[in-house]
Image (cartoon, rainbow, N blue to C red):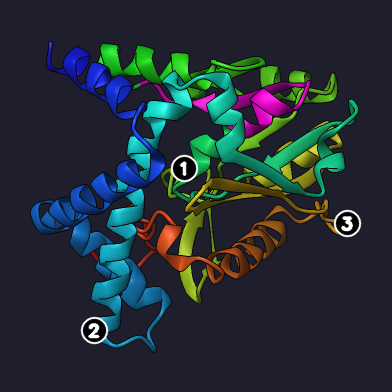
């Protein structure tokens, strides 16, 4: 019952002018910063490790801004998933090397965990005439799970692969020209990960970007989504000419290195509340 009520609230909030919604997100982000102490500590630890030159007050400000952007992006799902198609298109600006995503060539889209991930996915599926795919993890709450699935399948022709389905179906889709919207920059456990530097700190990272690109003979195209006062800018970048190589570990280290350059342009919009360094190399103490 509570989940259904929350979804109805999101529908109503999606009708507000964007400036009002962002102001509400500012308030909500400040409240979450105060109340959700464990995630505040996670974000603080991540930023201390990745930006050791920052002072404690600078880190506190960056953590607060991260919570605010996270809350604003969550509330934006009200209009992303329930607003009129015309409103959604008007607030999502697709820029950059968009031609990289046209045609039917195999493409793996590198979509790092910025707060605008859902906005980026929505822009691509609404504004480009291709069948896009991504990998989805089911939510424990069935009502919320159905809401998220419906939102992410709202526009275009899309396919969401469960993590338990394995890679064969994904590779097959890539080879027939269905771009994969891939989010490989989180700690998904040590089983399939390699430890490569992320801001100089060893981070368990899945080498899936390299492997999918190599197995499907696909080009890798970064898509970076930035929250703006008008909505979101979804920037398509040129395909990486030197990727993948025959060394998945080296490719994954290069991915993290290039990710850092993206984060440095908008550090407050990255998903710092995730335990990025939860798994550590053997013998290295934990940080959380």
Q: What whole-number distance in Å separates the C-alpha atoms at marks 1 and 3? A: 29 Å
Task: Give 152 or 16, whichever is nearer the viewer.
Answer: 16
Which corner quadrant holds the C terminus?
bottom left
Residue situated in front as seen by the camera: 263 or 180: 263
User: Could you tell me residue 96's position as x and y percent?
Assistant: 77, 51
Q: Relative to residue 141, is residue 235 depicted above or below? A: below
Front label number (3 vs 2) = 2
Horizontal side, residue 205 vs residue 246: left or right:
left
Q: Sequence order check: which comes first, mark 1 or mark 2?
A: 2
Q: Please give the label number shown on residue 56.
A: 2
Q: Is residue 195 left or right of residue 177?
A: left
Residue at position x 67%, y 31% from top? 124
Residue 139 placed where, x, y %? 32, 22
SS type, badge 2: helix
In the image, taking residue 228 as reference, residue 11 lies left or right, namely left
- Sequence-first tag of 3 and 2: 2
- The span picked out in magenta is 122-138
Q: Residue at x 88, y 56 (%)?
A: 241
Q: Which mark is residue 82?
A: none
User: Is the residue marked by circle 3 packed among few (<14), some (14-19), or many (20+) residues within 10 Å?
Assistant: few
Q: Kindly identify which residue carries mark 1.
A: 191
Mark 3 lies on residue: 241
Q: Is residue 133 above or below residue 108?
A: above
Can residue 286 be spotted in the picture? no
Q: What distance separates the C-alpha of mark 3 from that of mark 2?
A: 40 Å
Q: Residue at x 74, y 25 (%)?
A: 171
Magenta stretch holds residue 127: yes
Residue 151, percent from left and from top: 46, 19
**Mark 1 element type:** loop
142 is within the stretch colored magenta: no
């Amino acid at each position: 019952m509570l989940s259904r009520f929350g979804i109805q609230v999101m529908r109503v909030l999606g009708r507000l002018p964007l400036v009002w919604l962002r102001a509400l997100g500012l308030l909500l982000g400040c409240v979450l910063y105060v109340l959700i102490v464990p995630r505040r500590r996670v974000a603080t630890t991540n930023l201390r490790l990745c930006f050791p030159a920052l002072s404690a007050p600078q880190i506190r400000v960056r953590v607060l801004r991260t919570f605010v952007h996270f809350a604003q992006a969550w509330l934006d799902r009200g209009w992303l998933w329930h607003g009129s198609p015309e409103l959604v298109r008007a607030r999502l600006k697709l820029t950059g090397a968009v031609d990289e995503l046209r045609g039917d060539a195999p493409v793996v889209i590198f979509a790092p965990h910025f707060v605008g991930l859902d906005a980026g996915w929505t822009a691509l599926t609404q504004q480009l005439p291709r069948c896009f795919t991504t990998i989805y993890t089911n939510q424990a709450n069935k009502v919320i799970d159905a809401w998220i699935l419906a939102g992410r399948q709202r526009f275009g022709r899309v396919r969401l692969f469960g993590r338990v389905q394995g890679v064969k179906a994904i590779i097959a889709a890539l080879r027939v020209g269905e771009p994969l919207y891939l989010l490989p920059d989180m700690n998904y456990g040590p089983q399939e990960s390699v430890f490569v530097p992320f801001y100089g700190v060893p981070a368990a990272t899945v080498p899936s970007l390299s492997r999918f690109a190599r197995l499907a003979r696909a080009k890798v195209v970064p898509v970076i989504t930035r929250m703006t006062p008008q909505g979101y800018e979804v920037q398509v970048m040129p395909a990486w000419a030197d990727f993948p190589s025959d060394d998945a570990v080296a490719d994954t280290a290069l991915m993290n290195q290039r990710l850092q350059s993206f984060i440095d342009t908008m550090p407050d919009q990255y998903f710092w509340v995730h335990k990025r360094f939860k798994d550590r190399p053997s013998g290295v103490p934990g940080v959380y």
